[in-house]
């Protein structure tokens, strides 16, 4: 029996966290999201609740690698062989899901493993899929990502960036598509991520508990109401959840039709230069996030308001800072940059 999750649409406040997650659903190439904050700020609850609003997607029925039949160049070896033999791939429509990575997961559990004994005996490759196979086309959630071994984090980020999981054992190799939305949560009190890894997350949010009395009261009331009757509470939010899912579906279809003129690109470059951001990853990510924000709001062109909406999410974790110093995002500097264009 599936455990009922607190509805995403009923989460009070935490607008930046919710926006970072929704933008990644609209355009997974943004590069995922890192949610940093103290315990008890609804990070895990929010990520897991996405399962109720994630859109549907087409997959090859029965494929353990969740192959997308609309992307023939990214089919796993098994599906590619069927196509080569002229067989018709059976298509299933499934809702995207949240795949959780256990903190204790080994590299073999994450990437999958080749059965070398089977290869030696038969000459045929036999691959046991790992978490990355389950995550293909879905959302991969890593709680306490800062406590994972660095080589596992590197593996996740490399696979997310390239869209491919490549496994090699004893000279035998296997590859399959691994396109997923990587979401990590962490409590900075338990240790930070290396700056090189921070930069690989598309968006980042510093999640804080709300100090407003009315907001905190509403959080308590909604949670208590849910705990008393989860089924009824979830049912009462179904219409709103369905509307948000439909909005996300439309945005995913339209995001690649959103345009941005040279004035927007100039504004992005001005902002990243003014904030002292190294490299070009931030510029590209900000453009993608701005387009996703426009698509989510039903528009076909990026405006400066889209840049205002996403700038802090893109830049806050990429700004230079001294050890033990918190990086504060300067909204006044952002506004000066936008007004100068």
Image: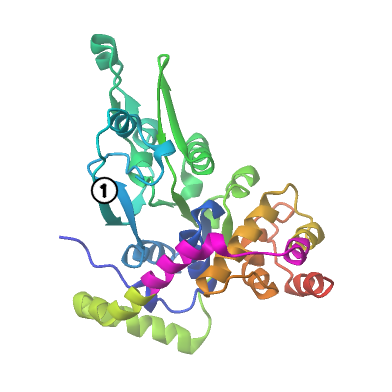
- In the image, residue 123 sits, relative to residue 182, either above or below, namely above
* Residue at the image point whose x is 48% and y is 78% from the top: 13
Extreme residue toward the top, this view: 121
| Left or right for 172, reference 272 | left
Q: Report which residue position mark 1 lands on.
A: 91
- In the image, residue 92 sits, relative to residue 296, either above or below, namely above
Extreme residue toward the front, this view: 86
* Secondary element type, mark 1: strand
Predominant secondary structure, magenta span: helix
- In the image, residue 207 sits, relative to residue 161, either above or below, namely below
Task: Check residue 246 for magenta coloring.
Answer: yes
Disc 1: CA contacts within 10 A as few (<14), some (14-19) or many (>=20): some
- The picture places residue 322, in percent across and down from the top left corner, at 74, 53
Q: Quadrant location of the C terminus? A: bottom right
- The picture places residue 188, in percent across and down from the top left corner, at 55, 56
| Left or right for 327, reference 12 | right
* Residue at the image point whose x is 60% and y is 58% from the top: 288
* Residue at the image point whose x is 48% and y is 39% from the top: 159
Q: Quadrant location of the N terminus? A: bottom left
Identify the magenta region. Answer: 244-267
Extreme residue toward the right, this view: 340
- The picture places residue 233, in percent across and down from the top left corner, at 25, 80
Extreme residue toward the bottom, this view: 214
Residue 197 picture quarter? top right
- Number of dots carrying numbers: 1
């Amino acid at each position: 029996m599936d455990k009922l999750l607190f509805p995403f649409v009923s989460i009070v406040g935490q607008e930046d966290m919710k926006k970072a997650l929704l933008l990644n659903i609209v355009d997974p190439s943004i590069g995922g999201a890192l949610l940093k904050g103290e315990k008890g700020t609804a990070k895990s609850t929010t990520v897991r609740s996405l399962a109720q609003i994630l859109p549907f997607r087409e997959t090859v029925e029965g494929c353990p690698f969740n192959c997308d039949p609309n992307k023939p160049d990214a089919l796993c070896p098994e599906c590619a062989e069927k196509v080569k033999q002229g067989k018709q791939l059976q298509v299933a429509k499934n809702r995207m899901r949240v795949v959780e990575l256990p903190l204790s997961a080994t590299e073999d559990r994450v990437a999958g493993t080749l059965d070398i004994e089977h290869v030696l005996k038969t000459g045929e490759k036999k691959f046991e899929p790992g978490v990355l196979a389950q995550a293909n086309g879905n959302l991969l959630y890593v709680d306490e990502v800062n406590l994972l071994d660095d080589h596992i984090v590197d593996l996740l980020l490399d696979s997310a960036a390239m869209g491919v999981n490549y496994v090699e054992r004893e000279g035998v190799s296997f590859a399959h598509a691994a396109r997923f939305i990587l979401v990590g949560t962490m409590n900075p009190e338990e240790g930070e991520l290396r700056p090189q890894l921070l930069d690989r997350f598309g968006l980042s949010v510093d999640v804080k508990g709300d100090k407003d009395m009315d907001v905190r009261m509403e959080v308590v009331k909604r949670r208590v109401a849910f705990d008393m009757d989860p089924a009824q509470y979830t049912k009462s939010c179904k219409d709103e959840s369905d509307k948000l899912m439909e909005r996300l579906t439309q945005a995913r279809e339209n995001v690649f039709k959103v345009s941005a003129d040279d004035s927007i690109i100039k504004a992005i470059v001005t902002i990243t230069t003014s904030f002292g951001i190294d490299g070009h990853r931030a510029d590209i990510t900000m453009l993608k996030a701005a387009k996703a924000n426009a698509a989510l709001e039903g528009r076909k062109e990026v405006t400066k308001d889209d840049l205002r909406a996403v700038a802090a999410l893109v830049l806050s974790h990429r700004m230079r800072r001294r050890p033990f110093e918190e990086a504060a995002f300067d909204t006044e500097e952002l506004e000066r940059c936008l007004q100068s264009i």
